[in-house]
Image (spheres, coloured by chain):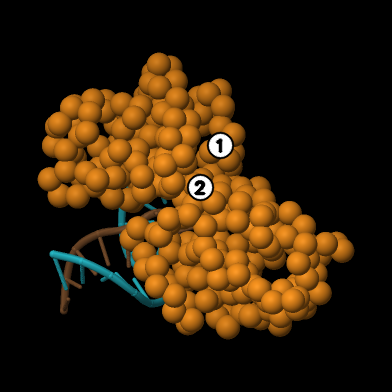
Chain colours: A orange, B cyan, C brown
Amino acid sequence: VPEILEVEQARTLLDIAALDRVVVAVHAPDAWFLKRGLTPHGVELALLGRRFTTARRRGKLLLLDTDGAGPVLGLHLGMSGRVLVDGAAAGDPLVYASNRDVVAWRRFGVDFAGGGSLHLRDPRRLGSVELDPDEDRLGIDAFELSARQLDGIVSTSRAPVKAVLLNQRRIAGLGNLLADEALWRGGVDPARCAQSLSADARRALHRAIRTTLRVLGRRGGSHTGSLMPERRPGGVCPRDGARLLRRTVGGRTTYSCPVHQR
DNA sequence: GATGACCTGTGA
DNA sequence: TCACAGGTCATC
């Protein structure tokens, strides 16, 4: 899933359906899922009797504030996690991940007074739950990224520009699909050394990131990109019909057009 | 900054 | 059985 668009869908669901309800039970059957020393008992103590007051998001990290000076609950969806409230998830089914409902995949959850629940379902167990997460380990949220900020980030790194876009300490929220889509829309070669981008290329990339988030957000998620159907052996560029390049860049499988991405 | 590790499901 | 998957972290 879960890139910034899916996490924002989850945040909206939490905002609409999970706030101001009293937690009467906490389920943390998978201790491995709890991070930074958190234990099943610890998270139960921290949440029992409290209500969530705000649903926030920074990059791909979900943040639930609690009442009465309680802790912030941090949820991360990893590669296959989904948030469900009262048994329903937000948004489209995930691509590249199972969408079946297997009870064993409920890695964490709470029950609310009067019935209903909040659950995190994650087949691959790469998600996580923590209390009072360090929100500043994450960089500027991709939705907030200004052209000037992108300039500063891109012009100070010699890594491939895609690796820079994926680095959550720099920009928080972009994942593999969104990065490829934005670079494709902006006409920028993912493997290009970030520092070497011209001011024009940086501007084009910034516009492309904004467009990608807006358009794919409206369509329903990271999997709705124009490049997505061609993300396969033999895929061609939807813009100019060239055979797409498939490489590993920044450690991730990368598709790009050798003709218009320079 | 690139690499491998983490974990598990799916489809070829 | 194998390759691969929209993420992140420690390590060289």
**Which chain's residue wears label 1?**
A
Asked whether, in this view, residue B5 is left or right of residue A151, the answer is left
The residue pinned by badge 2 equals A4
**Which chain's residue wears label 2?**
A
**Circle number at residue A143:** 1
Q: Nearer the viewer, residue A12 or A208?
A: A12
Asked whether, in this view, residue A37 is left or right of residue A241, the answer is right
Q: Residue A35: which quarter of the image?
A: bottom right
Residue found farthest to the front: A114
Q: Residue A113: which quarter of the image?
A: bottom right
Tag 1–tag 2 contact (CB < 8 Å): yes
Residue found farthest to the right: A68
Seen at 36% across and 45% down, the residue is A224
Identify the image quadrant of the N terminus of chain A. bottom left
The amino acid type found where label 1 is placed reads Phe
For label 1, count other residues whose C-alpha is less than 10 Å away and answer few (under 14), some (14-19) or many (20+).
some
Q: Nearer the viewer, residue A209 or A100?
A: A100
Q: Is residue A89 above or below residue A11?
A: below
**Circle 1: element type:** helix
Indicate which disc, 1 or 2, sits on the residue closer to the N terminus.
Answer: 2
Res A193 seen here: no
Q: Position of residue A246 (x, y in %)?
A: 20, 45
**Circle 2: element type:** helix
